[in-house]
Amino acid sequence: MTGPLERLGRWALERLTALGRANLFLLRLLGALGFLLRRPGLLVKQLYAVGVLSLPIILVSGLFVGMVLGLQGYANLVYFGATSSLGTVVALSLVRELGPVLTALLYAGRAGSALTAEIGLMKATEQLASMQMMAVDPFARVLAPRFLAGFVAVPLLTAIFTAVGILGGYLVAVVQLGVDGGAFWAQMQARVLLWEDIGNGVIVKSVVFALLANWIALFEGYEAHPTSEGVSLATTQTVVVTSLAVLGGDFLLTALMFGVW
Amino acid sequence: MPSSALPSDVTPPCEGQLVTVRGLSFHRGERAIFREVDLDIPRGKVTAIMGPSGTGKTTLLRLLGGQIRPDAGLIEVDGLRVPELGRLELYQLRQRMGMLFQSGALFTDLNVFDNVAFPLREHTRLSENLIHTLVLMKLEAVGLRGARELMPAELSGGMARRVALARAIALDPMMVLYDEPFAGQDPISMGVLTQLIRTLNDALCLTSIIVSHDVKETAAIADYLYLLSDGQIVEHGTPAELGRSPSPWVDQFMHARPDGPMSFHYPAPAYESELLLRDAA
């Protein structure tokens, strides 16, 4: 019978081994990206699958998040007579935090889980093995296009989410609640900085989250046990691990970027 | 050109050994899948490797294709030592191999035509016109030219296996590996596949290696049989020779007898004592 300490040790060793495998997987994936220079069509197809098809959920979510921010911001700022700052509040919330984080979480749920299930099923149905036996490297032919497409798509989706969110905030604050439109845009223009806010938030954070979300999704699919239960578990793992990685990563990045530490 | 006109160091395409396996050992965890296995596969013949489920037949194909490496022993395909090949050399060798997977392993996002065209598009620079012609030729050979627009989900199990066979021979390989080609097939599909494997082998001068436990169908088309059990080759010979074998194990397997040297029961404690112990508890 194994003691708790032995089980803990085994669990820790398994996690460490998995982390090592994940790193080797990423290195091999990066090495396979050169293949896409010869086959850009594969990238375009995946950009459609993970990027364009994620647009509806990003647009709708972004709009609602922006509208909620507008409502909540107004409800609090009105007590201080500071509703003219609403544009800044909405924009900074979206640009620095909610845009990159929520886009990554929505992407993990919509496209990341789909990537895991697709790769896991290709493994379970021996499609990846048959590709290898046809002397075609699945890393180059299957995984690399999906990885690069996701890597390109997430920052773009983040920018779209943020822009639509700001529009949602404008609709609620200016059109619905009567906040002055000029103040809404002028305060935003004055307070939101190009590199400190947009560069750090929309660009750096979303690039890091894109790497994490796609790496985790593809690795989980590739490592899935080739059974229906294994694919189901891998899909769940993708959403859970990506969410934790994004939220944990967001805390670290925020602390580093905005001068708390 | 007659074979006598070939230079002495050139092997005629349908003669000699294509695959040589010596002292092959392979373990999965503590369990020995193969122990010191030797076998030879001649060119241009249909060789079958048979044995009960779980004896490592599919593992043997994966070892021959270089998908896994043995713990010890020599695996030589067309003069190349497979476990020692780098990825590039292995991929070059695999371009001369075809493999029919048990599930067919067709790409579910591609239709029948694109599945068969896949290896041609990946490995050649042929024009789409020529690829179209070649794919139609391969599909005609397996009787599915008319099904080229169908998606894999629209195919029956037998049709999927035939499309996979057309894909496996798309690059005109020297050798085709068949993993349980008859499993789960209705009698008509089984008959079609049996005939196709033999006909393609002879017409294209292929070397076919079939892994199967379907005795009747496999023995009907194989030139030579190896019987695997408990990690070792227990018998080998032509189907006629094995049919006359005095070995009780061969007799049990070839004639599908439920009991014999290979027990019907998985190893377990005595039945009575287990029931009595449970009652006592």
Image: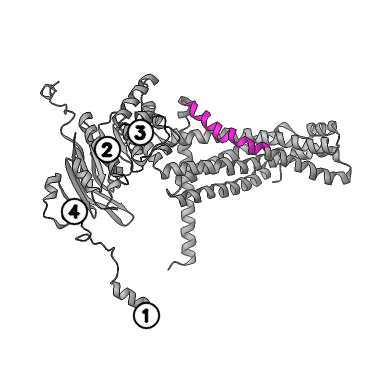
The kind of residue tagged 1 is: Ala
Q: Do pointers 4 and 2 mark residues of a single chain?
A: yes
Mark 1 or mark 2, earlier in chain:
2
Badge nearest the viewer, 1 or 4? 4
* Left or right: A106 as drawn, with respect to B260: right
Helix, strand or loop for disc 3:
loop
- Residue B201 lies in magenta, yes or no? no
The kind of residue tagged 2 is: Val
Helix, strand or loop for disc 4:
loop
The kind of residue tagged 3 is: Ala
Numbered mark located on residue B255 in the image: 4
Q: Position of residue A28 (x, y in %)?
A: 45, 38
The kind of residue tagged 4 is: His
In front of the other: A3 or B55: B55
* Magenta segment boundaries in residue numbering: A39-59
Please rate how many residues cluster around mark 4, counting C-alpha atoms within 10 Å: few if below 14, some from 14 to 19, many from 20: few
Helix, strand or loop for disc 1:
helix
Measured Cα–Cα span from mark 3 to mark 4: 39 Å
Numbered mark located on residue B192 in the image: 2
Helix, strand or loop for disc 2:
helix
Name the chain under label 4.
B
In front of the other: A174 or A80: A174
